[in-house]
Amino acid sequence: MDGDGEAFVALVEPHLAGARRLIRAAIGDSADVDDALQEGLLAAWRGLERYDPTRSFGPWLLQVVLNAARDLARRERVRRTEEIPATLATPAAGPDVLADRALLRARLRQALATLPERQRVAVTLFDAEGYSHAEIARILGVPEGTVRSDVFHARRALRRLLGEGDDA
């Protein structure tokens, strides 16, 4: 045939319906039937030099098409994934999140250590412990305005030290 496309089509056309049924039987009634048929015909075209013209063309073609369909189905099974049900997902943070948190805690401890004591205590009581400015003022024995100022300056310094910019 010397690679003549029209001759190949003429040879293949009488076997297309049978090839389609064979593929459907092999891989099931799926949307992959047409893809598998196309893969099989392409494989037959490429492997035409292996065809022995003394034998019947139909069985050879069906064997090539079937092998291509099986290969395609095998590749699809390998690629196919299933979503993990939410019931199997762990509510705990993963190792990546735990490592990020530990790193942030270490950086925060370092940054807090650079602040003056009153600012460090004021921002810790306000942001971490949830005390009000008035309560912190009573604890530290300073005016409430001083606590507000200490928290403001401590936060600004922490943003700068932690690399989050200076918003003030």
Image: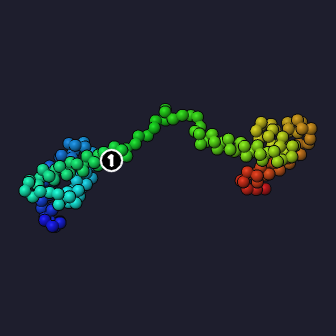
Q: Nearer the viewer, residue 13 or 140?
A: 13
Q: Is residue 50 above or below residue 80?
A: below
Q: The C terminus lies in which quarter of the figure?
A: bottom right
Q: Nearer the viewer, residue 163 or 47?
A: 47
Image coords of residue 165 (percent x, y) = 73, 56
Residue 128 visible? The answer is yes
Q: Is residue 92 above or below residue 34?
A: above
Q: The N terminus lies in which quarter of the figure?
A: bottom left
Image coords of residue 147 (percent x, y) = 86, 44
Furthest residue in direction left, as rendered:
54
Image coords of residue 4 (percent x, y) = 16, 67
Q: Is residue 132 above or below residue 162?
A: above
Image coords of residue 161 (percent x, y) = 76, 52
Residue visible at 11% across and 52% down in the picture: 58
Q: Nearer the viewer, residue 167 or 134?
A: 167
Horizontal relation, residue 6 to residue 81: left or right:
left
Residue visible at 22% across and 60% down in the picture: 46
- Could you say which quadrant of the image residue 123 lies in? top right
- Could you say which quadrant of the image residue 110 lies in? top right
Horizontal relation, residue 78 to residue 147: left or right:
left
> Which residue type carries mark 1?
Arg
* Residue holding disc 1: 75
Colouring rule applied to residues: rainbow
Q: Neighbour class for label 1 at 10 Å: few (<14), some, many (≥20)? A: few
> Is disc 1 placed on a helix, strand or loop?
helix
Residue 17 visible? The answer is no
Residue visible at 17% across and 49% down in the picture: 63
Residue visible at 74% across and 45% down in the picture: 108
Horizontal relation, residue 167 to residue 45: left or right:
right
Q: Is residue 140 above or below residue 65?
A: above
Q: Nearer the viewer, residue 3 or 112?
A: 3
